[in-house]
Image (cartoon, grey):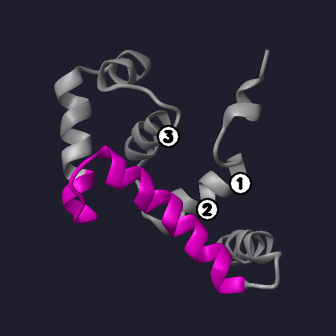
Amino acid sequence: MDSATDTEIFSEKEWNVLVNQLSLSPRQSEVIHLLLNGHSDKQVAMELDIAVPTVRTHLSRLFSRFDLQDRHELILHVVRHFRKGCRTNGNGDGCLRWLYNMTTSNSD
């Protein structure tokens, strides 16, 4: 059986950088993280111990903030943001260098 880390799209370090770069609140981060793992609105609500309409409000605000239409676009936005950071640094190790630069510049 796979461990949770084997099924994660982003490592903890990658996710923390993305959350910072996208200026997500802790709750927005939790909602998006669960969406990335395939959770429905109802599953997100149960996991976070909030009502389904509250999940939908968080999503609606995220869609509006990033000028997106739905959860699929939100997921693509997050992945594209990550890939853009990786590509910007090129040379095959772009993601590693991007993560290093982002974590060292945030620790000052």
Residue pointed to by mark 2:
17
Q: Earlier in the sequence, mark 3 or mark 2?
A: 2
Q: In this view, does 76 lie above or below 60?
A: below
Q: How far apart are marks 3 and 1 (CA)?
A: 16 Å
Residue pointed to by mark 1:
13
Residue at image location 23% in from the left, 22% down from the top: 52
Task: Check disc 2 and give the amino acid type.
Answer: Val
Q: How crowded is mark 1: few (under 14 residues within 10 Å), some or many (20 or more)?
A: few
Taking the magenta stretch, the answer to whether it contains residue 80 is yes
Q: In this view, does 53 lie to the left or right of 59?
A: left
Residue at image location 50% in from the left, 66% down from the top: 80
Q: Is residue 101 above or below residue 20?
A: below
Q: In this view, does 32 lie above or below 1?
A: below
Task: Check disc 3 and give the amino acid type.
Answer: Leu
Identify the element where label 1 is drawn: helix
**Quadrant of residue 5 in the image?**
top right
Residue pointed to by mark 3:
36
Taking the magenta stretch, the answer to whether it contains residue 90 is no
Residue placed most toward the observer, 75 or 46: 75
Residue placed most toward the observer, 16 or 59: 59
Question: If the image is split into quadrants, where does the N terminus sit?
Answer: top right
Q: Give the range drawn in magenta.
A: 62-89
Is mark 2 in CB contact (under 8 Å) with mark 1? Answer: yes
Q: Residues within 10 Å of mark 3 (few under 14, many from 20)?
A: some
Task: Check disc 1 and give the amino acid type.
Answer: Lys
Query: Residue 3: x percent and y percent?
Result: 77, 23
